[in-house]
Image: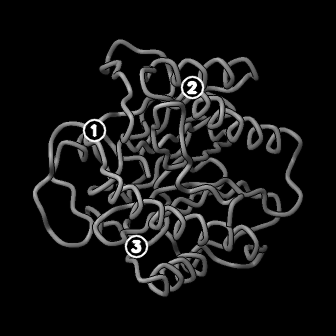
Amino acid sequence: MNILSNLLSQKTQAQPAKKQRRGIEIKSPREIDIMRQSGKIVATVLKEISELVQPGMTTADLDAYAEKRIREMDATPSFKGYHGFKGSICSSINNEVVHGIPNAKKVIRTGDVLKVDTGAYYQGFHGDSCITIAVGDVTPDAAKLIRIAEESLFKGIEQVKAGAYLLDLAGAIEDHVKGNGFSVVEEFTGHGVGRNLHEEPSVFNFRTREMPNVKLRAGMTLAIEPILNAGSKHTRILSDRWTAVTVDNSLSAQFEHTVLVTETGYEILTDRTKL
């Protein structure tokens, strides 16, 4: 889940109210084991949603399913109630970039580019991940956007290891996105994740001097989440104060994983392929 910078500066609250810790946390082996479980819960829910979604369903249907499954696995939805957000998932369709609110009137149709982002809070720690689903037959351009979005995530993840820098993964993402003719959304970034849904550092997907170029250390846990637009990189927020859309009505796609930094590389804690 991405979030606007003004919300990042506020106290984050998942379920129990607690003071936001400052700085970048290095997780202990015990904490990492818990995050493996929270990540597995998220991965399970997203894999199941990707298999059950079909035209005619509503985004509220998917939200109800996600909440039910998260709670069945002894976790609670990370997003529900977060700064007043009403859903257990963010469901964003076509030109909706992020933070789409599930709605019983929002019908999913053949050809849609559907982003589903969710998180699970388990024994004090969060997992966070997003997928983009091609609903039925999509246009070749939409299929390419989805493919490049997923590839760009892994281009970034492949740079992760202790001693690397955030700009290493940001540059790898940006080069792959722009090299394929798409734009990187800069108004939303990835983030640290763990005890809180959003922690330091900001994990950007483009080269910048505006944010600290943090050196990665083993035990950091990062939510890496590139967002690609087919047209302009710029977005605007709808009147619901959550949903971000492309300014030119172009399509948008996003993928996200919670990733553990290790001494020699990385471990994807929300890996759906290992279920």
Q: Secondary structure at mark 2?
A: loop
Of circles 2 and 3, which is in front? 2
Which residue shows up at 24% across the image and 47% down it? 7
Badge 1 or badge 3: first in the primary sequence: 3
Q: Quadrant of residue 241?
A: bottom left
Give the quarter of the figure containing the C terminus: bottom right
Instruction: Find disc 3 in the rendering and name its residue.
Output: 77
Q: Which of the labelled discs sits on residue 159, or is there none?
A: 2
**Real-space CA distance between mark 1 and mark 2, rounded to the nearest whole angstrom:** 19 Å
Amino acid type at image mark 2:
Gln
Q: Residues within 10 Å of mark 3 (few under 14, many from 20)?
A: many
Badge 2 or badge 3: first in the primary sequence: 3
Instruction: Find disc 1 in the rendering and name its residue.
Output: 200
Which residue shows up at 42% across the image and 21% down it? 163
Q: Position of residue 160 (x, y in %)?
A: 52, 30
Amino acid type at image mark 3:
Pro
**Real-space CA distance between mark 1 and mark 3, rounded to the nearest whole angstrom:** 21 Å
Q: Secondary structure at mark 3?
A: strand
Residue 260 position (above or below residue 194): above
Q: Residues within 10 Å of mark 2 (few under 14, many from 20)?
A: many
